[in-house]
Image (spheres, grey):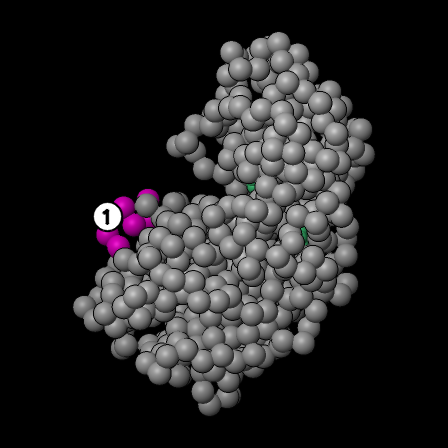
Amino acid sequence: CGVYGVYSHTEDVSGMTYLGLYALQHRGQESAGIAITDGAWMDVTRGMGLVNEVFRHQVPHMENQCIAIGHVRYSTTGSSLLANTQPLMVNYAGGKIALAHNGNLTNAAEIRHDLEQQGTIFQTSIDSEVFVNLIARSRQETIEDKVIESLKKIKGAYCLTIMTESKLIGARDPQGFRPLCIGKTEEGSYIISSETCGLDVVGAEFIRDVLPGEMVVIDEDGIKSYPFATEEPKASCIFEYIYFARPDSVIDGQSVHDARFMMGRMLARESGCQGDIVISVPDSGTTAATGVAFESGIPFVEGLIKNRYIGRTFIQPTQKKRDTAVKLKLNAIRSVVEGKRVIMVDDSIVRGTTSGKIVKMLRNAGAKEVHMLISSPPIGYPCYYGIDTSVRKELIAATKSVEEIREYIGADTLHFLSIEGLKQSVSAVDPEAMCYACFNSAYPIEDGEKPAGDSKY
Ligand code: 5GP
Ligand code: SF4
Ligand code: MG
């Protein structure tokens, strides 16, 4: 998912949130929502679909609106339903609160069960709802303390934007799984965004990342930092750099583009690839493919064309929808690949569906050989922290060896980047302070706290 927030007394906070969500659209395409306040009233508009579909007719607006938060959803917990869209908004004894969440919680089922035993009513099936209930029930005096008390009870991955009538709050979990950053416009408005591309789109300047285990509060006095759990080992998601984030974003000081390009270079070195042309599976494989071409000296050309009017196929929640989507999405250029030894680069193999179909597509278009290079290691284990690779039996690398995967997708050769190569690709961050669990099962949050992948949570 993607989260966003704006605090401003002079600029159009809901309009900026709309633009921010538009820039974060790659982080989730199932639903979108914007909550706004003018300091007294609070209102939320949510709907299924893309940002420009949900807000086709109107971007929400209030006369003296001063804070807005927004969310784009990619469902990992709870079904893809209108009731599960965000931001969530509640009225409680202390006022109103709206909340948008990116990530997956690992003890939400437990907390929810406890709260339900005490009579709390839940309105959605998403894990994020425990935040608002914990905050509403907290006996702490200030909203800052209420939020911190709640965060301390919760485990797992979360980046949050929270809004009260007078404050914009951002928080990042102690491991720092998902990205979150702060920006400021020339007019002095503050922005909180999942990625820096959400700052660029409204012309805001990047100030800094929200730190793992930090909460930031923005109100009329400016911005204040509340570190609440900074001692825990860090585990930022390496997959943000491999696939999820946009290449023009910078996360924790590491350019996503540069990481991806380097992954391509490392992949070329490790595989010693041989061929006539390097092509990518657009768009997610393109940056790594340029790195492969750069390192190997083999020319990068466009061999596959993507229909730019379709979104990310993986993000379609059912397998059937994903299947048709591949054909709609990609087509080979015969004159480019015919008679060639093609090196095809993609960022990851999850189920193997896409890859198999594309190999066939290239062969049908006359490719002599198809060598597949993947700029990440095999995904053998589910993610419990907010990337939808949670059902282990669907992961092809969970049950097949590299050779079996090669055979399944029908490529002449297949190479995956090693974890070592991956680590060397993120030189601006500490490679040891990252999560690689879907590749090596070294889950940063202890065993027993992982939810059963495809259950309610
Ligand atoms: P597969 O070959 O496993 O069917 O699909 C792999 C493709 O799915 C890659 O091109 C990758 O870019 C894309 N993809 C889309 N969404 C995701 C996601 O959330 N996680 C992963 N790992 N890959 C995804
Ligand atoms: Fe990211 Fe994989 Fe860790 Fe999930 S398990 S947080 S996708 S590195
Ligand atoms: Mg892709």
- Asked if one can make out residue 401 in the rendered structure from this viewpoint, the answer is yes
Residue segment shown in magenta: 53-59
| Residue 114 place in picture, x, y as percent | 62, 74
Q: In which quarter of the image is residue 29?
A: top left
For residue 369, what is the image quadrant? top right
> Badge 1, how many Cα within 10 Å: few under 14, some, many 20+?
few
Please, what is the three-letter code of the amino acid marked with disc 1?
His
The secondary element bearing badge 1 is classed as loop
Tell me if residue 56 is in the magenta stretch: yes
Task: Name the one closer to the observer, 218 or 380.
Answer: 218
- Residue 91 sits above or below residue 440 on the image: below
- Left or right of residue 34: residue 127: right
Residue at image position (44%, 73%) is 169
Toward the viewer: 155 or 247?
Answer: 247
Decide whether the magenta segment is chiefly helix, strand or loop.
Answer: loop
Q: Quadrant of the C terminus?
A: bottom right
Residue that appears at 38% across and 54% down = 200
Image height of 34 relative to 9, above or below: above
Question: How many labels were placed on the picture?
Answer: 1
Residue drawn at point x = 65 percent, y = 42 percent: 263
50 left or right, relative to 62:
right
Measured as percent of width and height from the top left, residue 330 is found at 50, 25
Q: Position of residue 297 (x, y in %)?
A: 63, 27
Q: Name the residue under label 1.
A: 57
Q: Nearer the viewer, residue 117 or 276?
A: 276
Residue 318 visible in image: no
Q: Residue 179: within the magenta?
A: no
Q: Position of residue 216 (x, y in %)?
A: 47, 75
